[in-house]
Image (cartoon, rainbow, N blue to C red):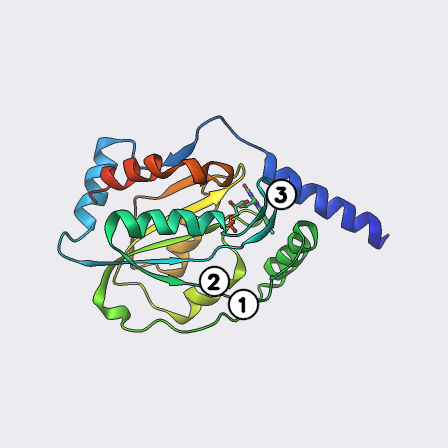
Amino acid sequence: MKTMKYILASALCMLVSTACSGSKKSESNVNEPEAQEATAEAVKKDGKTLVVFFSHAGDNYSVGDIKVGNTKIVADYISELTGADQFEIKTSKYDGMAYRPLCDLAKEEQQKGELPPFEGSLENLDQYDTVFIGGPVWWGTYPQVMFTFFSQYDLNDKTIIPFTTHEGSGLGNCVKDVKKAYPNATVTGEFSMYGHDVRSGKKEVEKWLNKIGF
Ligand SMILES: Cc1cc2nc3c(=O)[nH]c(=O)nc-3n(C[C@H](O)[C@H](O)[C@H](O)COP(=O)(O)O)c2cc1C
């Protein structure tokens, strides 16, 4: 019975990971001129920008055993192209885990609403006006460890720009969940990219950043 449950959970996890909903390389809400304008207005021209992200290196269903996680690659493009500082949400909890057991653990964490701790702390949050928030989609939304960050740091006075890497879910529920975590923040300009496309995706990221006023 336990084996059956494991097989079903793993199959489902692979299904969400491969259920590509289209051939688009990336997805953004800023393809409409009004949306671009609104985001560009919300981003303070002389303000400071931070990228907060989580990314899991290691066994990845689509791109094999990766040394650098997909979302970290996008976070690094953002910093390189905008000069934004970074805070990486780091935990050793998933180190060395194979894809399927990680899927099971992530599902369990989500079902139980667990908030796994992360390393380090973010200083001088006050200096930032705009915060990019990025992570992989795990079972339809950000990994639980990102919700731990949301529960500890108040970004309600910021402009928040969510982004994801994924294998079919796009932005999933990430934007909705960021808005829920920070009801008084301006959440805008979101962007998502297939994980298997990030290594050749710098131009896409640059296009998105240009559209939202960077
Ligand atoms: C535990 C787990 C759950 C996942 N769930 C989804 C999902 O629901 N939808 C999806 O499109 N991709 C899903 N994926 C694929 C990842 O979102 C994708 O590989 C992402 O680019 C990984 O980013 P990272 O290398 O920065 O961690 C999942 C991957 C893992 C490991």
Q: Report the amino acid beneath label 1.
A: Leu
Q: Residue furthest front?
A: 67
Residue 193 image-quadrant placement:
top left
Q: CA distance from mark 2 to mark 3?
A: 24 Å
Residue at position x 62%, y 43% in the image = 61
- Compare marks 2 and 1 and give the one earlier in the sequence: 1
Please rate how many residues cluster around mark 3, counting C-alpha atoms within 10 Å: few if below 14, some from 14 to 19, many from 20: some
Which residue does the numbered mark 3 point to in the structure image? 61
Q: Is residue 52 above or below residue 176?
A: below
> Callout 2: helix, strand or loop?
helix
For the C terminus, give its image quadrant. top left
In the picture, the disc for residue 144 is: none
> Callout 1: helix, strand or loop?
loop
Residue at position x 36%, y 51% in the image = 76
Q: CA distance from mark 2 to mark 1?
A: 7 Å
Which x, y percent locates residue 32?
Answer: 27, 31
Which residue does the numbered mark 1 point to in the structure image? 115
Q: Report the amino acid beneath label 2.
A: Phe
Which x, y percent locates residue 172?
Answer: 48, 43
Q: Is mark 2 within 8 Å of ligand 1?
A: no
Q: Are marks 2 and 3 in contact (CB under 8 Å)?
A: no
Please rate how many residues cluster around mark 1, counting C-alpha atoms within 10 Å: few if below 14, some from 14 to 19, many from 20: some
Front-most of residues 34 and 118: 118
Residue at position x 78%, y 46% in the image = 7
Q: Is residue 161 left or right of residue 128?
A: right
Q: Is residue 89 above or below residue 139?
A: below
Q: Residue furthest right?
A: 1
Q: Are marks 2 and 1 in contact (CB under 8 Å)?
A: yes
Which residue does the numbered mark 2 point to in the structure image? 147
Which x, y percent locates residue 176?
Answer: 42, 49
Residue at position x 42%, y 48% in the image = 73
